[in-house]
Image: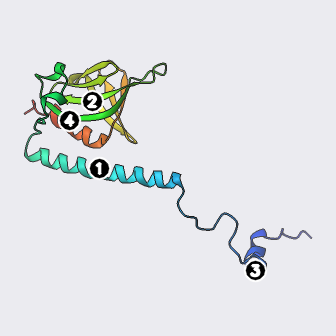
């Protein structure tokens, strides 16, 4: 006659010496990595709230250009309305051999312009689709390529980008 194997978990629940918490199950104070994750969640929540409020506002009134002082806008953009600015932006143009370009990103009425190590301009008419990947804004371009923008408040920038693109539409 064959006997069933004993249940190893049964001994842990009945043996008095095993009534202590199992190793690894103790509650620990948050680690630096957990603190970082909490901070990321807070940034995403704050960004999402700001983007939602902007979208609601743009339903009733169109987006308006910023009124930056002349020294804040590079001379190449002096004659263009600027709707959003992101400092410390990084543009990665879907190339693994180039680490990306950093600088200040400007959303104008007709293009996204990164001014920094190099100047990169992406016409708004070339952007087919935008999406979010964590804290990055993903752009799908008309030529089939893509680009990512590491920027602060990417959800709010996406709302601004959408509002600017809809300015000329009825």
Percent position (x, y) of residue 13?
Answer: 72, 77
Instruction: Say whether residue 152 is left or right of residue 161.
Output: right
Q: Viewer-nearest of labels 1 and 4?
A: 4
Q: Circle 1 sits on which residue?
A: 48
Q: Label 4 belongs to which residue?
A: 84
Q: With respect to residue 56, does 127 lie above or below?
A: above
Q: How is the image coloured?
A: rainbow
In depth, the one of 54 and 101 nearer the eye is 101
The secondary structure type at the circle numbered 4 is strand
Of labels 2 and 1, the one closer to you: 2
Closest to the camera, between mark 2 and mark 3, is: 2
Which residue is depicted at the point 22% across and 40% down? Answer: 159
The crowding category of the residue bearing disc 3, from other C-alpha atoms within 10 Å (few below 14, some 14 to 19, many at least 20), is few
Mark 1 or mark 3, which is nearer the start of the sequence? Answer: 3
Q: Earlier in the sequence, mark 4 or mark 2?
A: 4
Under tag 3, what secondary structure?
A: helix
* Numbered disc 1: secondary structure: helix
Tell me the CA gap for discs 2 and 3. 64 Å
Whole-number angstrom distance, CA of label 3 to CA of label 4: 64 Å
Which residue carries the number 3 mark?
A: 14
């Amino acid at each position: 006659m064959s006997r069933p194997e004993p249940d190893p978990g049964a001994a842990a629940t009945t043996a008095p010496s095993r009534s202590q918490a199992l190793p690894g199950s103790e509650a620990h104070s948050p680690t630096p990595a957990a603190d970082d994750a909490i901070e990321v969640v807070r940034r995403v929540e704050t960004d999402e709230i700001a983007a939602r409020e902007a979208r609601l506002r743009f339903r009733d009134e169109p987006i308006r250009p910023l009124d930056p002082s002349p020294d804040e806008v590079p001379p190449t953009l002096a004659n263009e309305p600027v709707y959003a600015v992101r400092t410390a932006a990084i543009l990665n143009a879907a190339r693994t051999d180039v680490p990306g370009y950093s600088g200040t990103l400007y959303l104008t009425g007709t293009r996204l312009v990164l001014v920094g190590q190099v100047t990169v301009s992406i016409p708004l008419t070339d952007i087919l689709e935008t999406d979010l990947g964590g804290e990055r804004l993903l752009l799908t371009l008309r030529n089939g390529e893509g680009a990512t923008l590491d920027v602060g408040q990417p959800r709010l920038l996406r709302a601004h980008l959408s509002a600017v693109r809809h300015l000329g539409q009825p």
